[in-house]
Image: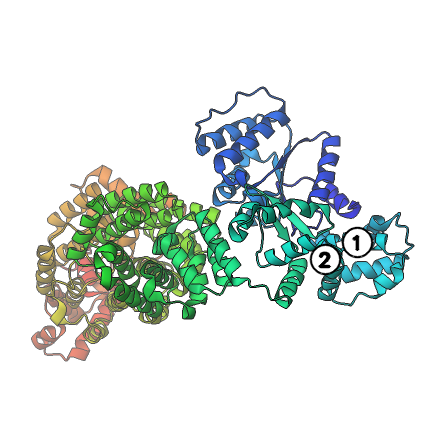
Amino acid sequence: MRHAILAQLQSAGVKRVTTVIAPAGYGKTSLASQWFASLRDEGFRVAWLALDQEHGDAVVFLRLLLDAVSSTLSEDAPSADGGMAAASLLAMLATRLRKASSPVVLFLDDYHFAQTDETEAIVARLVVDRTLDHVKLVLISRTPPRFPVSALRLRGELKQINIADLGFSDCETAELFAGQSADLTREQLAELNKRTEGWVVALQMVRLLIAENKDSNALLSSFGGSSAEMGTYLSEQVFSNLPADIQDFLIKTSPFPAVCRSLLETVFQSSDFANLIGRLNEYALPIAILGGEFGWVRYHPVFNAFLKDEASRRGVLTSPLLEKAAHWFQTHGDLDAAVRHALMSGNANLAADIVEMSGGWRRVYVSSRGETNLFNAILSNVALIDLARFPLTTLGLAVVSAKAGQLDAANHYMEIAECAASASLPRYLCDLRVVRALMALYFDEQVSSEDLAGLESDLANAANSELVYRALGLNMLCYNYLQRSELDRALHYGHVAIRVFRDAGADFGAVHLYAHIGQAAYLGGDCASALEYYDTIIDEVQTNIGKGSDLDALGQVLKAELLVMRGDFVGANDILSWALPHLERHDAWFDVLAAGFIGQQILSRLTGSAMASHGLMDRARPVAKRRGFSRLMRLIDGERALLLVQGGDVDQAIRYAEANGFGKVTIRSAVDNDLATHLRGTTPALLWTRIYLASGDVGLARETFEWLLAQQGRKPHVVRAIELALIDILLLAAEGNMSLLGVRLADLLLNFPLEDYRSLVLIEGGPLIRLLLDCANSSGFSPVLRSRLQAMLSCSEMGQALPDVAPQPASANALDALTERELAVMQLLSEGFSNKEIGRKLSLSDNTIKFHLRNIFTKLHVTTRTAAVTAARSLGILA
């Protein structure tokens, strides 16, 4: 049997992973066992592992693999210590497999029984380990693997067998019916195979019926054309010949997707009734024995549909049975099944109560994938639920809605939960506080210092020891201290939260923390650790959820910001081109989108053009407005004004700043200029420092800058500190204080990892780069620091040339190129006079002064007033 498909497998060779995926009754195990025997006869090292539900435990699964491998390799290996952890067992398994000198083929039959997050991660790690390429896996399952297989497919190392492949061919159907007493022609068998679509179970059932029916022609001709008609006919034929007690059993258990003895004893309060499950094998029934801890049995869907219709016809009340089943699943910890059965019973309030009793909102963060499906099921039936009775479940609806970007719905459910909890606030106050902090993250709202202190007090209370609650509370402390630039506290709470999430088995929640501590490390100057944290997000999410998910895009965007800063523009562009638009549509919060926007801005300006940067702003601002992220809108507006300044369009920058919340009245605003809470982007005082500098008003620029520094109550983070140091250098150059400029540059190179943040220098443009290089080339500058600066600006570590961000230096004959009038304008410009003041001193109009300035900029190859003064001094045009 199955000659064609077996020949196909043999000709294709043994791949790194072969999957045989189909529902019960398609002959998966039969095919795989034939291939197993064939490979064994060819001399392959093969092992057959029959899995059941107990192997969903990582330790049990690994021990089975170790035993099978040791037996296959015929080695007398020491057995694993009984207390060894999964990680140690996996390392031992990999070591033993590496000893094999020839291919090892492991057949994992009924893989779906053992298919948990833990076992999927183990198989994924075996697959991605290139030192184990000689180990081949054959997964025989009803459900496909969830770990990524695209890389295997691209390498030609994946073979997939599915329903279309497993359906019987005409020849195989003829072989199945060979030897029947009834003579069936080839045409009749072909027609039968067409009607059944090669469905093995259906063909076997017809074969049994024909064996008991002398008039095979009448039997075959009575079938209708659709598979539904065929299934009903077959089910009725089988059912009508069953004993009355078995018929009664099948009808009363038909509401359940699957049954086991323990479930039936609870639902029907009768061990005698439950014992009937053991007699089902005595009859030719289309059932699947799932096995596992409780000995599960499932009816084929077609047969089950018939049984449900029969139960309805006989007036069997199924709702009470399903409610009892829901309680049974709840008792045994299978919340998905409990909620599903409660909803099938029509009692949506019971489903909500089951989630409530299991922790409500906490379930969002349980396991490697989270249990958002529970809440999605509740949301589908929310109109039937009295939410006021279930505040913890309603808080979960708020969390899931916020994560999906449905902020209005999240706010609606949050209000219901708060009202529902108001009658018993002491009981729910801690839950409300931590979820409110989480909602603030998604709504881009500030959590007050009082609320943070309250959250810390809640966590210090021994009564609040539930792990997922503690983990999320620590998560919120980590995030909010990050938002205040208290980076050490953010890192502390973040690492503690990760450990607590892991201890609670809530790996899905733990993954989010790497986004926070990664940013704390990045802003604190530790790019190596930040990159490690971001890669952890990406690796765990791709292994447990899949590529292209929300969390995958989140980790990728944060990583891209770091790559942009380092100067890896190609790698960053590959990421941002898909990940940033994904987050703009899906699950993200302010600082992640801000990181992506700033990274894309710098990338566009260094590799593209001002038009590309403005286009990005035009796309990003509606996203920020739609999601209610006012801080993101403000960041975008500030960057647009800054872009205008650095492009030389100062007057337009001033008009735009005044119209969009960055006017002169905000220069001395403590809140708007608090660098500890503005992690990215410009602030009014920073922007106007640059505007005054570009306008030639160096004194006012210095005054504004010094006020900003004096205003800060907390030391700026590293990225901001580098930016401030560069602005100070520009001011010193405009002031002509070259000796202090050299000191500032030396301090910058000594105190900061400038190689990891080189784009902060590059984005300032050619005049600053030339200024720094000229300063470093002076006789009194440290040769070591000079070499470090030159290496940093070369981008050699990135394996690429310095982007063409700087115009060519002004030539030495620029002095000859400037007219007498232009030299006069240049002299007054260097003394800090504005356009109007220069015009009055030279008796010229503003437009004429602008005309002369444009000519000066062109001849000196610069774009700003400050750069013109710097270039003129370096060329000896000015003293």
Q: Where 642 sits versus 460, above or below?
A: below
Provide residue 526's location: percent of width, then percent of height: 28, 43
What kind of residue is marked 2?
Phe
Residue located 20% across and 45% down the image: 460
Q: Where 467 sits versus 685, above or below?
A: above
Dot 1: element: loop
What kind of residue is marked 1?
Ser
Numbered circle sitting on residue 239 = 2
Provide residue 271's location: percent of width, then percent of height: 57, 46
Residue located 29% across and 61% down the image: 439
Q: Where 732 sits versus 141, above or below?
A: below
The answer to whether residue 156 is seen in the rendering is no
Pointer 2 or 1: first along the chain:
1
Residue located 43% across and 60% down the image: 351
Provide residue 474's location: percent of width, then percent of height: 26, 48
* Real-space CA distance between mark 2 and mark 1, rounded to the nearest whole angstrom: 28 Å
Q: Quadrant of the C terminus?
A: bottom left
